[in-house]
Image (cartoon, rainbow, N blue to C red):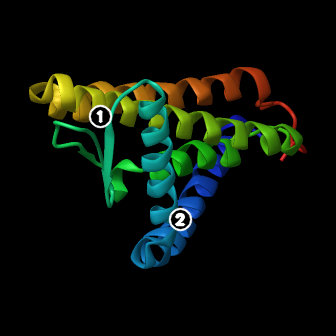
Amino acid sequence: MNLNNKIALFFGKAIALYVLWYLIYEQYLMKVGWLDKIIIDNLVNTSYKVLQLFGYTVFIYDQTIGIDGSHGVFIGTPCNGVELLALFAGFVLVFYGNWKHKMWYIPLGLILIHVLNIVRIIALTIIAYYMPETLDFNHKYTFTLLMYVVVFIGWIIWVKKFAVLSKENNQ
């Protein structure tokens, strides 16, 4: 298989996976909300426990977490990381590489991204308490950039260390 065919196959798989994602998540799971609720609850509760561990007096109100004396941080569906998790996993799934490696690399990457999202929420909660005027900037730019850089690095590691473009039977 020549390089052009491999590239076309990659994009074909990516488009098919996106359509599958759209049908399953965007048209069903997002509307019923249970997956997002599970993830948001985990993010809020884990962040709460870590902040308490560091000595903060913390409150939770539904999907909002905050340090007493602040307005807190609302964790909505767009901020729960589900789409970022899918983006990471989808790339590794459609890119060349041995399935044996994909079976451990994808879960490890998803855990790392989720843990970093918890760290992001903790940091934003602290920012909301100490420097609320910078919260919007840090939410929109600093942490968004950081999360995408981590995902990109995960892809680069996959491509450099585990993807094998020369072997045709590695999928």
Q: Residue sitting at 47 percent across and 48 percent down? A: 45
Q: Residue sitting at 44 percent across and 24 percent down? A: 54
Residue situated furthest left in the rendering: 133
Q: Is residue 81 visible?
A: no
Closer to the observer: label 2 or label 1? 1
What is the three-letter code of the residue carrying label 1? Thr
Tag on residue 125? 1
Q: Residue sitting at 49 percent across and 73 percent down? A: 29
For the residue pair 115 and 105, the one nearer the viewer reads as 115
Query: Mark 2 sits on what residue?
Result: 21
**x and y, in percent, of residue 110 in the image:** 62, 42
**x and y, in percent, of residue 73 in the image:** 25, 44
The image quarter in which residue 126 lies: top left
- Label 1 crowding class (10 Å Cα cut-off): few <14, some 14-19, many 20+? many
Tag on residue 55? none
The image quarter in which residue 16 lies: bottom right
What is the three-letter code of the residue carrying label 2? Trp
Q: Residue sitting at 63 percent across and 39 percent down? A: 111
For the residue pair 153 and 41, the one nearer the viewer reads as 41
Vertical comparison of 90 with 29: above or below: above
